[in-house]
Each structure stands twice: as structure tokens, then as C-alpha cells.
Image (spheres, grey):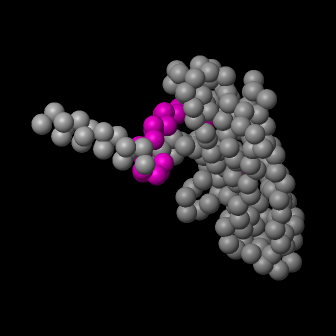
Amino acid sequence: MFRTKKAAAVLAGALLGSLLPVAAQAAPAAPMITLKVMSAFGSGCPSGTTDAQPTEDNTAFSLAYSAFRVYGNDYKSCKVSVRVSVPQGWTYAVTSVINRVTPDLDNQSSAKLQMNAWFTGSPWNASATDSINGPDDELWTTTSTAHSLIYAPCNRTLDVNVNNTLRVNGKASSSAELIDTDTQASTVFNLSWKQC
């Protein structure tokens, strides 16, 4: 009798687990990612002003520029190379690249952002060109979404390269800064993980 009740309980638990919504079932955690800024060149990223950090859940990583502010009738650019290392047995694809800009534009000013990103040794790349017109002082985000997922080769370390150019046209008092001043994130790479 006891064995029958125990077997019935196990079977009921298994059936209930299979009927739970996918979100309610435990998903495997993303592995830990290690980042190192290998180089940063350009007027938008003087030495020591660029940082790379993974998110707490390792589903993305971001670059932060602390000196990428452009004033009216000027531009700045920066090319950054970041080494991306992941544990053995895992690989990832970039699903989207998001840039976050804090503008301060009057009604006669505009801003334009051009972004190119690619991995050394991988066919993946992304690009975007977006602009806004003033007056505007709300956070501005641009997104480049992958049309298809290209996973990095298993058990290899790759370098991600990103080249950003930010222009502001208009009065010298207008500006735009390539950073979200609340989150301190400038460029965000969202990731999809899978095991090799």
C-alpha cells in the first residue's frame, strides 16, 4: 500500500512538472563570462575611460565610456577590442547590440550615431545608423538585432570589436553622451547560450 501511494505521488509530481509553464521550470544558468579590454582608440575613449562588465546573470555584457560626450558641430569616435572568454563546453551568439545615448539637444540641434561590431575569427557582425532631432533630453537607444544566430566556435576565446561614431550638429551648447547615466552602460551585447 505504501509503495503504491509513493509511486502514485512520484508519477503525479512528474506529470505536474511536465505541465508547468516553461518559465516556471528551472532553466540552466548561463555560465560565467570573463572580459578584458584589449585596446581602445579614438577621441571618444581616451586611455583609462573604457570598461567592460558582464551582467549579474551573464546573459549580456556591456561597455561603458566615461568620456564619450560630444558638443554641437563636432564628433567623436572610438574603436574598442574586448577579449571574451567562456568556460569549456559552452558557446554563445550575440542576439542584439544596443547603444544608449543621453542627449541634451535644443530645437535646432540633432545627433547621429553610427555603430559597427564584429568578432575576430567569426562571421558575425552588426551595424546600425540612427539619428534624432532636438529638442530632446530623454534616453535614446539604438538596436541592431541579429537576423540569424551565429554561435562562436566551441572552446575558443574571441575578441569583440566595436566602432562607434557620435556626431552632434547645432549649437555648441547642445550635446550627446554615449552612456546611460543611470545604468552606466554605453553599448550592450545581449547573448544566447548553448552547450557544445
Q: In which quadrant of the rendered view does residue 68 lie?
A: bottom right
Marker count (numbered): 0
- Which quadrant does the N terminus fall into? top left
- Which quadrant does the C terminus fall into? top right
Q: In which quadrant of the rendered view does residue 27 lie?
A: top left
Name the one closer to the observer, 128 or 166: 128
Tell me what residue is drawn at x 86 percent, y 78 percent: 108
Query: On the rendered structure, is 27 left or right of 107?
Result: left
Seen in the picture, residue 47 relative to 155 is either above or below; the reply is: below
Task: In the displayed orientation, state which residue is furthest to the front.
Answer: 1
Name the one closer to the observer, 145 or 113: 145
The range drawn in magenta is 20-44
Measured as percent of width and height from the top left, residue 185 is found at 60, 53
Seen in the picture, residue 144 relative to 39 is either above or below; the reply is: below
Can residue 181 be seen from the camera position used here? Answer: yes
Name the one closer to the observer, 43 or 36: 36
Tell me what residue is drawn at x 79 percent, y 29 percent: 123
Query: On the rendered structure, is 196 left or right of 18?
Result: right
Task: In the displayed orientation, state which residue is furthest to the left.
Answer: 2
Tell me what residue is drawn at x 67 percent, y 39 percent: 94
Residue 191 among those drawn in magenta: no
Measured as percent of width and height from the top left, residue 19 is found at 43, 48
Measured as percent of width and height from the top left, residue 97 is found at 70, 48
Can residue 81 be seen from the camera position used here? Answer: no
Query: On the rendered structure, is 171 left or right of 24?
Result: right
Residue 36 among those drawn in magenta: yes
Measured as percent of width and height from the top left, residue 111 is found at 82, 65
